[in-house]
Image (cartoon, grey):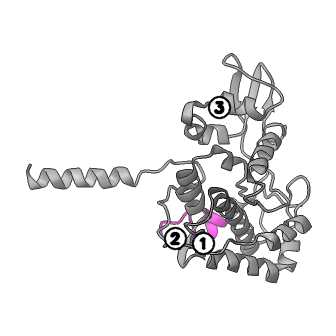
Amino acid sequence: MKTSTIAALALAASTLTAVAVVVPGFNPVPTPTYATPAAGPLVDHSAYDRLLKKHVNAQGLVNYLGFKADEAAFNQYLALLSKNPPAANWSKNDQMAYWINAYNAYTIRLILDHYPLTSIKDIGSKIKIPFVTTPWAAKFFSIGGEKMSLDNIEHGILRKKFDDPRIHFTLVCASISCPRLRNEAYTAAALEKQLDDQGRDFLNNPAKNKISKSDAQLSKYFDWYKGDWEKNGQSVVKWVNRYSSAKIDGSTKISYLDYNWNLNKQ
């Protein structure tokens, strides 16, 4: 085989490896390259749990000024996350709980860094880093010594490694149309219950999804991440029916609601 042909094949292979799902508002990113410790202590999320109970209401709206007042305690929890990335000896649920909590906590940190603001998308115009055009792509925190972004956590780790579409019911991008931010931390012991509870809450909230047998106006999540919902013999219809009290089928007219990016503040 000619040298030029081999080089072309290698380039094509590297290009395919770098391909990621493109979602409006989110930049595709590779999996972070931090060195995963072979063994390490589990992270205690109780400090974060106390802050969520104190500053997030039952509707998932956030008192950002309250988090600002408790900034020292909040930063201490973020430092705990930063220094203790998931290790090889952690269970799958421990790792998932860690990354979901990290995504939501660092999103709150990002909002506090730019507060007050009307929408998380307002931050994009303030970022002056080459090739970084959205707040989700900005590498503004470190975990295990590796600079990371929110995109790294969502697309490079949670979606890629764990292959559980229910994560879309848990990750909160500080916007009204996002799922409800739980006023408790995710934990390995409660994770399955929490994931299913988030699914029921999201699908049965008329502000997020308006569902009837004849007409289903769904969240944009079911459009943006359609490939995730269709994996493993599943479908959007099956996932909706898993959690929605109103059931749909192949005859249901499906459309998608406009996404409300206004800040999820109290």
Residue at the spot of label 2: 36
Q: Is residue 240 left or right of residue 14?
A: right
Q: Quadrant of the C terminus?
A: bottom right
Q: Amino acid at mark 1?
A: Pro
> Is residue 128 highlighted in magenta?
yes
Q: Residue at (9%, 49%) from the top-left corner? A: 1
Position in image of residue 249 (x %, y %): 70, 20
Q: Quadrant of residue 230?
A: top right
Q: Amino acid at mark 2?
A: Thr
Q: Residue at (70%, 70%) from the top-left corner? A: 110
Residue at the spot of label 1: 85
Q: Amino acid at mark 3?
A: Val
| Magenta segment | 123-140
Position in image of residue 217 (x %, y %): 74, 31
Position in image of residue 92 (x %, y %): 62, 57
Q: Residue at (54%, 79%) from the top-left corner? A: 145
Residue at the spot of label 3: 236
Q: Is residue 49 left or right of residue 7?
A: right
Q: Are marks 1 and 2 in contact (CB under 8 Å)?
A: yes
